[in-house]
Amino acid sequence: MGILQLMFGRSSGSWFTGAATKEGATMKTIVSVSQGSSEFDYDLETEFLGQLFRIIRIGTDGDLSRAEAMLESVHPRADAIGLSMLRDHYQVGGAQLRHPITARLEACVPDKPITTGAGLRAILQEWAVRHTQSELGHFFDNARVLFMDGQAGYRIARALSEHTENLFFADPYIDFGVPRLLTSLKQLETYTLLTAPVLRRSLAVKAVDTFRHTPLYHLGERLVAGSLHKAVSDAQVLVSSIADLADFSDKELDGKTVITSRVTESALDWMRSRRVAMVVDYSPWLAGRPVGVNVMEALISASRSRTPEQLGPDDYLDVIQSLGIVPRILYPNGYRRVNRFAFVIHPLSQQYLTKTSPLDWIASVSPPLVMNLVEKAVAYAPPFIYSKVSGIRSPTGDEAEGWLITVGGTPREIMAHDPEFTYARLLQAAELGKKLGAQIMGLGAFTKVVGDAGITVAKRAPLPITTGNSYSASGALWAAHEAMQRIGRIDIGPSGKASGKAMVVGATGAIGSVCARLLAKAVDEVFLAAPEPAKLLALKETIEQETPGAVIHVIGAADRDLADMDMIVTATSGAGKRILDIMKVKPGCVITDVARPLDIPPEDVARRPDVLVIESGEIQLPGDVQMKDIGLPKNIAYACLAETIVLTLEARFENFTLGRNIEWEKVREIYKLGLKHGMKLAAISGVNGIFTEEDFEQVRDRAGIGHSIPQVVACNSPSN
């Protein structure tokens, strides 16, 4: 008879009838007395570590007196006894919490090894965390973890505290009906130290059960229930028994990770119905069946002829390794991993402020002077959550959710202040993102160009930071490449290169040099313009080594060759300076402005309706994305936001794009990772928003270009 029968074996007859021997070997007896239902009782024989055992499970249906009587009856013939469905004695910080009911039952058997499995359980719980973090990499980084019973999960909490500070404990709810979470290990330890004497006395005289039948308790119960449901909704990881999750809906448990024990197929089916993303099961499973930790520890105790108190690390390690016990990572609905991000946005102009209540009303009745004061005041406002973002699903099964966090400064206000002014608000946003459970934060719009472009923020922030500039550069060139084909002035040859001429203005800068290196792979001839001759020559040499056959020209001033260009990329840092004379550009030219602030002012764009001036390439996100309006169609995001999302899907929680010296290898890398996770070029935008087919038609008409436009596919992207 094998270990499979530990839970579902055939009965071997009445308790303690006949000699327990087999082929001359002595058979030892383990009895598990449970406060659970007697419906699941069993009596079986098995082999454990080369020794024969008889294991008997006796449920007492929650009747403490019956449990005491049963222990007194069976203990003379038991070699070790397990206690099930009871709380362990806990060591929480400096507080020793001895459960009075457990102690009462232990006292019934003073002369035999008796255990709840606490020693083995502590090892398996901590190992489950470490195993999962090792297997999945960064999984618990900054996760919001809710413990339904922090004292029972203290070892799990200590292990998780190495990866996140977002630990919450519902012990006040469970113990006293108080709707307040403990928010740190220190608070849990202090709470345990203060309440242990009260709980011991209350449980001993059943005072808690008496209180739970009073009207006052039922009034508080409704408050507690609503508050606890919110705590579950806000958590990303739940540490709980399956029974304690029974009252929570699929909406509250959708996408959650649950750390628990004894997950049977029926329990897994229930998790599946609640759309739980992942389950970590720390209980010992043998040959496909769960074994109670109390039974396992009693088996170890009897096989080693030691009391549970005498068992040491080697005893547990020998058993765990010899039986191949490993924590199980389960996906009830197929592989699904949910990672989290934060992304900083801000109003791009005073006009954006007027779209927000109650500022919209103020704007309607106030003169410009008042709105100027409002604009200044809003810049000092603390960061706040603009929108939760969910529904981003990669073809790999990975998911991303996050938060758009608003800082109040318009570009004018951001530029008017010292960089430290904006740094302080970005660090506040990072702290908010950390509390929400974000694992990385992206900087949007002008927040990524302030000061040293993210470097200082990354050094001080509690989260990894990226500016999104790598994907912005890739997306802008991707958009330009498609736009040139849609305008129809140039053709794409067999090599995939455009048969025309492209210029990079500001080629020796960080973004400009990246654009130049990418364009050399996508366009027949590339002109590099910058007022730094030596740097231009060095860049030309580098590109020719990287891309054999590339035709590269270097010039000091852009205006000289503007009229011959089919495509122009401006990537300077000369905000407020005239970069080029747009009137010299030939009709049908595509200009991509990747500088921030923009190199080409809106008034110049308006002067040339026969030229397409691109500000960015927007990215289509995979899945059914749910978030508030950011000025783009559904499922479409700015490339800088998309970079943060790609890194989140890939679990690359690191400082990725920082500073002004963008690495072109990262531009290529983020592009390829985007394709892996289902990102597509969705739209091409200018200063007035997304270009429609009518906009392209008007440029073609004004430029006198025909209408036979080839279709573009992703493989023609210059980032390939």
Image (cartoon, rainbow, N blue to C red):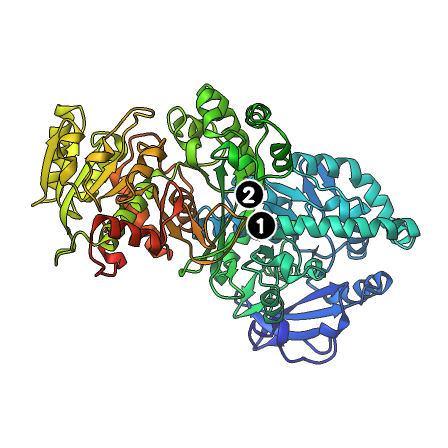
Is residue 430 visible in this depiction of the protein?
no
Disc number placed over residue 179 in the picture, else none: none
Judging depth in this view, the residue of 392 and 499 nearest the camera is: 499
* 531 with respect to 609 (left or right): left
Q: Where does residue 710 sit, x and y in percent of width and height? A: 22, 60
Q: Where does residue 521 sit, x and y in percent of width and height? A: 16, 47
Residue at left offset 51%, top offset 29%: 409
Dividing the picture into quadrants, the one containing residue 457 is: top left
* 380 with respect to 38 (left or right): left
- Are the residues flagged by discs 1 and 2 in contact, CB closer than 8 Å? yes
Judging depth in this view, the residue of 414 and 454 nearest the camera is: 414
- SS of the residue under disc 1: loop
Q: Name the residue under label 2.
A: 437
Judging depth in this view, the residue of 172 and 416 nearest the camera is: 416
Work out whether 436 lies above or below 497. above
Q: Mark 1 points at which residue?
A: 236
| Image quarter of the N terminus | bottom right
- Spatial CA distance of label 1 from label 2 is 8 Å
- SS of the residue under disc 2: loop
Residue at left offset 24%, top offset 57%: 715
Residue at left offset 59%, top offset 55%: 259
Work out whether 381 lies above or below 336. above
The residue furthest left is 549
Is residue 315 visible in this depiction of the protein?
yes
The residue furthest top is 418
Residue at left offset 34%, top offset 32%: 601
Q: How crowded is mark 2: few (under 14 residues within 10 Å), some or many (20 or more)?
A: many
Q: Where does residue 467 sit, x and y in percent of width and height? A: 39, 36
Q: Residues within 10 Å of mark 1 (few under 14, many from 20)?
A: many
Q: Which amino acid does label 1 sit on?
A: Gln
